[in-house]
Amino acid sequence: MTAAAPAARTAVAVAGRTGRPPRRAASRTLWIWVFLVATIVLFGAYTVWPAIASVGYSFLGWSGYGPDRPFVGLANYERAFSDPLFWRSVGVTLLIIVVTVPLRVLLALVLAVFLNDPRLPFARLLRTAFFVPVVATTAIIGIVMNFVLDPADGPVNQVLGALGIQPVDFLGDSSAALWSVMAVHFWKWLGLTLVYWLAALQTVPDEVHEAARVDGANARQRFWHVTVPMLTPFLVVISLLTIVETMQIFDLVQTMTGGGPYFATLVTEVYIYQQAFETARPEYGYASAIGVLLGVLTLLVVGTAALVSRLAARKGADR
């Protein structure tokens, strides 16, 4: 009986801390893992394993068909570094990031400040209107935009014609195609960045604004000296999320332009797809090597953006 007493006391203590008996807590933990099994299996099969396999395929001269998989070492990477189309795709991808990410982050912040004002009429309706494009499938938006921007009878060119302006081939002109894709991408995902900022604004206490108002600060002063400093830490996270999302632009570009015209909208993801599926002889090994390089590029871009954002946040805090 004395030997069972410590075990009983331990069970009572555990039950007291968790609010339930040890067996019930263990059963609850087991069921949590049971429900997570499907997610773990699918994530491993469709995300982790393809990423690992791509690294292995990048060292092979494999077409994707048949058992012939000769080991070529770093030949695919050497080819990528000497491939002008690969570097062009990298340049187009970085240009989209440099142009759209700062604009999205800043415009979404301004919109969030206005939409977070309880005095604004129809604030909920406006929030929904900005977020609706986010919910729509990107590929469907790309297909629809082909009709909207059609140079012959698209509604945009019809309006331009009514105003006496010559029709513009938004997706067929190499000087306009990339900017058209960026505009559609900007409109599609602006609502997501807006939601990020709206969530961040909820962390700013109303008491701080009220105290600043009592001290005589106007709306502009409260924004720059109260809201912005308290939102600066969120700038890092929101910027990184926006960058990563912007680099995943394959479906929109593929459905709108396919990387053309004349490679004007050829982003790296589309180039990988072309090398793997759209050439006369598919080159899975080379496409995998480009995919690995894109992953490294993503890490470099995100790391650089994180460093710059942290430095900016530190300077803002010092002020």
Image (tube, rainbow, N blue to C red):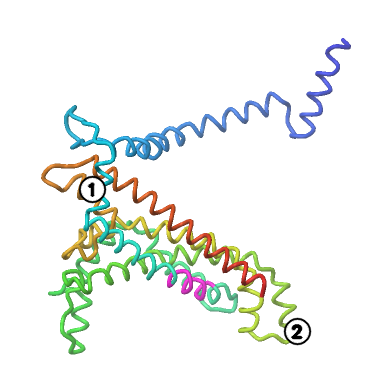
Q: Position of residue 286 (x, y in %)?
A: 24, 43
User: In the rendered view of the protein, which quadrant contains the C terminus?
Assistant: bottom right
Inter-mark Cα distance, 2 to 1: 64 Å
Residue extent of the magenta highlight: 103-112
Q: Nearer the viewer, mark 2 or mark 1?
A: 1
**What secondary structure is marked by label 2?**
loop
Q: Circle 2 is placed at which residue position? A: 215
Q: Is residue 254 left or right of residue 56?
A: left
Q: Amino acid at mark 2?
A: Asp
Is residue 179 found left or right of 124 in the rendered image? left
Q: Residue at x 53, y 59 (%)?
A: 237
Residue type, mark 1 in image: Arg
Relative to 8, does residue 79 appear above or below in the rendering? below
Looking at the image, which residue is at 49% across and 63% down? 239
Q: Which of these two is toward me, 154 or 119?
A: 154
Q: Quadrant of the N terminus?
A: top right
N-terminal of the pair, mark 2 or mark 1, is 1
Q: Main secondary structure of the magenta part?
A: helix
Q: Are marks 2 and 1 in contact (CB under 8 Å)?
A: no
Extreme-left residue of the structure: 280
Name the image quarter holding residue 38.
Answer: top left
- Asked if the magenta segment contains residue 107, the reply would be yes
Can you give x and y, in whole percent of width and height, for residue 61 in the image? Answer: 21, 36
Q: Residue furthest right?
A: 2
Displayed quadrant of residue 236:
bottom right
Outermost residue, bottom side: 164
At which x and y percent is residue 257?
20, 62
Q: Which residue is mark 1?
A: 79
Where in the figure is residue 190, as x and y percent of width and height? 42, 67
**Residue at the image position 36 percent from the left and 38 percent from the top:** 46
